[in-house]
Amino acid sequence: MAPPPAKRRKVQIQYRGNKKKKSYKAHKKQFLESGQRGFLATCNSNEWDCVKECYNILNQYADELYGADEGEIKPDCKKDDKVRDSSAVIEEEGSTDDGNDIADDLQTQIKATKEKVKRRFQVVETGVSNCVFIKTVLENPVPLAIHIIEDIAKTKKQASRYLTRLIPIQAVCSVTKESIVKAAARICDKYFQTEPTTFSIVYNKSYKHNIDRENLIKELATLIHTKNADHKVDLKHPKKTFFIQLLKNLCCLSIVDNYVRYKKYNLIELARAEECPDNTDTEAKDDKEAANDDEKIKAKNAEKVEETIVYKEKKRLAETEGSNAKKAIKIAEDS
């Protein structure tokens, strides 16, 4: 007998009607440009997680230092609500005015809501892997960075997992010697037209450039000494550090305080460190060590002088004994 025919599966066809697929507007990437300022952040991997941590840390400490950011629109606020509220306000305020004035005010309000709100912090592309730049509308990012660094050094609370270094950047310029020196001159007046202090120059690069490192450092050191000739170079414990970071086609410049003392602004190492010594303590320690070294050198030199004197005296005695022996032999032969 033939086997029974196979049962057909019932396929249920679902009709979606005239529903369209959701489409999302692609965000245009913003790139680092000359004239910007902000924070240079580095990470070992997971740049997106590093960006999130940058936003969290910067917004938290900026709210503590400057207050909440009123310019940024909250996620739960919709544009329709803002337009509706603005139109209601205009209707109340302009009820006695002409219709044309009300329409113009309404168009102005609608246009204002469509304009992009300037955020306090915004990530931009650097073109370098594991290197993130957060641009800011703050006039000077250094006070905020110092506030973050000092708080982490005091509380020893690890604030990041992927973010390693967070360095404030005061100027961004093109990668040419003339542009770098010109940008450096603009920010040097505030930090080096002061009482004598110690400084160092840190030069880093991510790509190969045709800039002579030694000549650039010498020219920047000369620029600093023109502000005050009594400034001294100190590579161990400088009070101020001129930070230079060469990226793909741009250069980031900044002048930071206690760069070496605060673990080169490495947030993870700063949280793990036992205690950051004060510059006065380190300078006193260095002076004491230098004095001890000078005493040791003087003692060694004195020993060498004594050895030389003893050697010369022995040599003289040996020569006199030899001459006396020769005279005695000659007298014996003559007799």
Image (cartoon, rainbow, N blue to C red):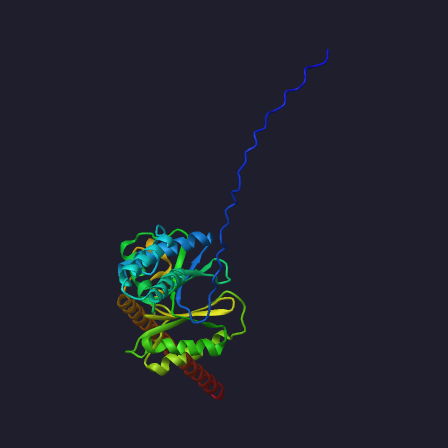
Residue most extreme to the bottom: 334
Please, is residue 231 above or below residue 251 in the view? below
Tell me, yes or no, if residue 268 can be seen here. Answer: no
Instruction: Out of 246 and 274, give the one closest to the viewer.
Output: 246
Instruction: Out of 4 and 142, give the one closest to the viewer.
Output: 4
Residue most extreme to the top: 1
Please, is residue 316 above or below residue 281 in the view? below
Q: Position of residue 259 (x, y in %)?
A: 35, 66
Residue 167 sits in which quadrant? bottom left
Q: Position of residue 156 (x, y in %)?
A: 30, 53
Q: Position of residue 165 (x, y in %)?
A: 40, 59
Residue most extreme to the right: 1
Q: Residue at x 61, y 24 (%)?
A: 9
Tell me, yes or no, if residue 180 can be seen here. Answer: yes
Q: Position of residue 78 (x, y in %)?
A: 37, 52
Residue 276 sits in which quadrant? bottom left
Instruction: Out of 198 and 140, give the one closest to the viewer.
Output: 140
In what quadrant of the picture does the N terminus appear?
Answer: top right
Q: Residue at x 44, y 84 (%)?
A: 323
Counting every numbered tag in the picture gives: 0
